[in-house]
Image: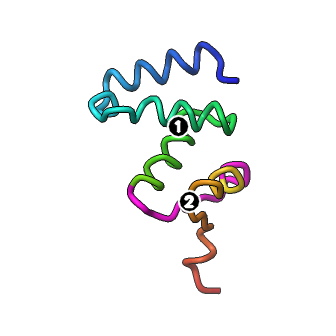
Amino acid sequence: MLSEHTLQSARALAKTDRIEAETGTFQKIITIAKNERLSFYDSSYIYYAKEKELKLVTEDKKLNVKAQKYVDVQTTSTFISP
């Protein structure tokens, strides 16, 4: 469960950013954060990758596993030749 401090930080960010202007975006990111037990920050990457139909590239193992429920996830090794 997200701490009250995390929720307050996310709300403050929404007020200073255009996230608030996009109908429902803030709530959708919070929902991902709660469901996956991720930070607002990590959840926003999942949300925008899904929304824009992009692959999510991350080296974060926890984010990689959880994001696979929503989007195609890859690591940088996919793009770097040995």
Neighbor class of circle 2 (other Cα within 10 Å; few <14, some 14-19, many 20+) is some
Report the quarter where the C terminus lies: bottom right
Mark 2, secondary structure of its residue: loop
Q: Residue at x 31, y 30 (%)?
A: 17
Q: Which residue is mark 1?
A: 41
Q: Which residue is mark 2?
A: 71
Q: Is the residue under label 2 in contact with that under label 1 (CB below 8 Å)?
A: no
The amino acid marked with disc number 2 is Val
Q: Residue at x 53, y 60 (%)?
A: 56
Neighbor class of circle 1 (other Cα within 10 Å; few <14, some 14-19, many 20+) is few
Rendering quarter of residue 16: top left
Q: Nearer the viewer, residue 62 or 22?
A: 22
Q: Earlier in the sequence, mark 1 or mark 2?
A: 1
Give residue 48's position: percent from left, percent from top. 43, 49
Counting every numbered tag in the picture gives 2
Give residue 75's position: percent from left, percent from top. 62, 67
